[in-house]
Image (spheres, rainbow, N blue to C red):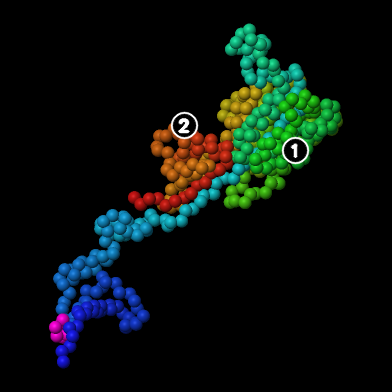
Amino acid sequence: MKHPTLPLLLLTLACACGPSEGDPTDTDTDTADSSDSLVLTTDGSSGAPTTDATSDSTTDSSTDETTAGTTTADACVDDGDCAEAELCEAGRCEFNPKWCGSEVVKADVPPPPNVVLVLDKSGSMVNPDLFWDDDADDLDDDGEQDDAPGQPATPKVSRWSSLHAVVSLIGSKFDAGMNLGAQLFPSVDAQAVLGAQACLVSDPPEVAVAPQNAAAIIAGIPPAGDLTLAGGTPAEKGVASAITHLMSLPPGDGELAPAPYLILITDGAANCSTAAQSDQALLNYDQNLVPTIAAAADMGIGTYVIGVDIADQVDSQGINPFAVLNEAALAGGHPKEDPSERFYNTINELELEAALEEIIEEVLSCTIAVDLPDYTTPEVTVGETKYEEPLPDGADCETESGWRFTDASMTAIELCGAACANYQTSGAVEIDFVCMPPP
């Protein structure tokens, strides 16, 4: 009886190389170690088994790959042939030592700062004899516009009117970028008398620090046209109340606590000292203002000082308010660079606005510290705009939008141009650390 022709059967037997003795569960069958393979076939006509050696080309290839310590799967032409964590080096896939994984790590960014505006509401702020040229159209004070002789200058306004306008404007512009509050000195209950009723200060402040608080601040202070403001200048008591309030605020939810600041705006020397022994002594200069500001700085609370038309001259008490406010600015830790004028002195509403805006922009710093993980690069998102790459070397940070490292240490980045402006007004910035692309 004839047997039907059997189909060709191919069986590869691989020798197990190693010290173990034939563990039946071992499934490690790396073909690079199969140089001793045998091929058993059954002849198509007789079915007799025969033994053939593997072809020379196969043997040579396997031997070469074994010698090189790689497998056919390791061979590559470019990085695209390799796994995510590998690079193609000399025709084989090698682990990329700069691979940092696929996770995106978000950086801790500073939360919005806590800022208290400490505002002078004394009677002098609405004294008609001290009204000023708010729009600076009559600097020579001849009653005519400097740019249009013969045309009457705009009427002068109270200092309080200008301060109110500037607080409203700046507060609204930077409302989303900071937590803002307001402290008046004296309070709205102060009276034009010689005595303690002229020195009242609200504790806590009239408007507590809170996010997006500009509207609440405008509602919580006297209106721009109010000419009934009265009282002394208890600046130290106002500063002390604001300090206590800032110290009472919660530290925040993130790793970084909101930075605390005071912005003191006043038109004269402080009085109403808590150490005064008589009503008459309340008129004397309060020497506690500068030490109180210095103590706040020691606690981490910085103070900026803005003067409202402060003359550099000695008053009837032998006090020079200009020199005193210079000392206060130095004590607060944020003086101007001008060695002769360390506080921000202003003589009209335009200068007052510019000073407060400059201070807020410094408080809302566009320089952000980063702790850059190895083999990562930042991607910065401000609002809805993502900046994946830093600005090129030599870029003008004032005019070009984006970010750059502040120096070669790469421990801080600086937002530039529109990116900085958008951050300051929106308070929205995210910094992601992503893996560097392979070199």
Q: Residue reaching furthest top?
A: 150
Confirm whether residue 328 shows in the render.
Answer: no
The magenta stretch spans which residues? 43-49
Q: Position of residue 277 (x, y in %)?
A: 84, 32
Whether residue 167 is in magenta: the answer is no
Give neighbour class at mark 2: few <14, some 14-19, many 20+ (Cα, 10 Å): few
In the rendered image, the vertical position of residue 90 relative to residue 121, given as above or below: below
Q: Is residue 75 left or right of residue 139?
A: left
Q: Nearer the viewer, residue 357 or 280?
A: 357
In the rendered image, the vertical position of residue 122 relative to residue 64, given as above or below: above
Q: Which residue is mark 2?
A: 399
Q: Position of residue 266 (x, y in %)?
A: 70, 28
Residue in the picture at 72% in, 22% down: 158
Q: Determine which quarter of the picture holds residue 5.
A: bottom left
- The main secondary structure of the magenta stretch is loop
Mark-to-mark CA distance, 1 and 2: 40 Å
Q: Determine which quarter of the picture holds residue 147.
A: top right
Q: Kindly indicate whether the residue at mark 2 contacts the one at mark 1 (C-beta within 8 angstroms).
A: no
Q: Amino acid at mark 1?
A: Glu
In the rendered image, the vertical position of residue 32 relative to residue 299, given as above or below: below
Q: Is residue 24 left or right of residue 59?
A: right
Q: Which residue is mark 1?
A: 206
Q: Secondary structure at mark 2?
A: loop
Residue in the picture at 49% in, 53% down: 105
Residue in the picture at 49% in, 41% down: 385
The tag earlier along the polypeptide, 1 or 2, is 1
Q: Position of residue 284 (x, y in %)?
A: 78, 27
